[in-house]
Image (spheres, grey):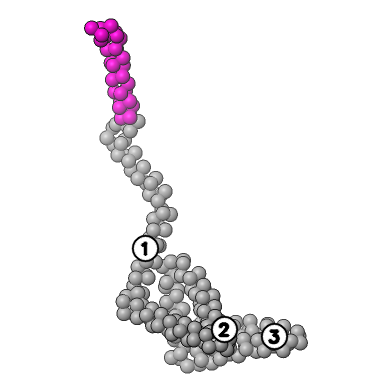
Amino acid sequence: QMLPLTLGANIGTTITGLLAAMVSDNVDALQVALCHLFFNISGIVIWYPIPIMRRIPLRGARALGRATRRSRLVPPIYIIVVFFVIPLLLLGLSSLFMQKTVGFTVLGSFLVIGVVLGIARFIWWWKKQEGLQKCLACLDRRTDMNNTMKTLPEDMQFLKSKVAQLVEHTGLPEDEEAGDAQKGSDGTAEEVAAENEENPVGDKNE
């Protein structure tokens, strides 16, 4: 139910930029605004009318929601990769081919091949080498660790209360045990001092 609303909101954001470009009397600004508008319209035409194509973004949204429930790191990682890393990578590759020199063109070609091979290797690892399960297991471990650190003070208080109940049940308070040990050490020190008084230094020399 949210998919049509989201697609309509995307069109609404482009209308604002289009109105601003129309009053600016700048051809470049109007061109960018129209590109933004028709880009979103083409996305709606591709992903919404056909039911089979409509399932792809819905499944992706469900998968992203399940991953978000496992860890809060998923949304910022998704935003950084999709909205910063990928656009900057594509912009950098396109700028190499726009230099119109053989060196930059060859460098861009090798980088494109490397990127394609890297994507293929990642898909192989994700699908065939249990990369998805490994990522989910890592997220679960981090979530369990965070939950453990959050509940650690409460667990310590619970353990202290149980120890106090156990000491009370045995009839020997913990402070009394510590006091007996301290008294024993003090008694030993007093005995050593008494022996030193009975045996002066002269007797030791003899």
Q: Is residue 15 above or below residue 144?
A: below
Q: Looking at the image, which residue is at 65% across and 86% down?
A: 32
Are there few (<14), some (14-19), or many (20+) residues within 10 Å of tag 1? some
Residue 7 in view here: no
| Image quadrant where residue 176 sits | top left
The residue identified by callout 2 is: 95
Q: Looking at the image, which residue is at 33% across and 25% down?
A: 182
| Image quadrant where residue 138 sits | bottom left
Tell whether 83 sits left or right of 157. Answer: right
Give the prevailing secondary structure in the magenta stretch: helix
Regarding mark 3 in the picture, which secondary structure is present there?
helix
Residue 179 pos. (x, y %): 33, 26
Q: How many marks?
A: 3
3D distance between C-alphas at marks 3 and 1? 48 Å
- Mark 2 or mark 1: name the one nearer the start of the chain: 2
The residue identified by callout 1 is: 141
Q: Amino acid at mark 3?
A: Ala
The residue identified by callout 3 is: 29
- Mark 2 or mark 3: name the one nearer the start of the chain: 3
3D distance between C-alphas at marks 2 and 1? 41 Å
Magenta residues, start to end: 177-206
Q: Amino acid at mark 2?
A: Ser
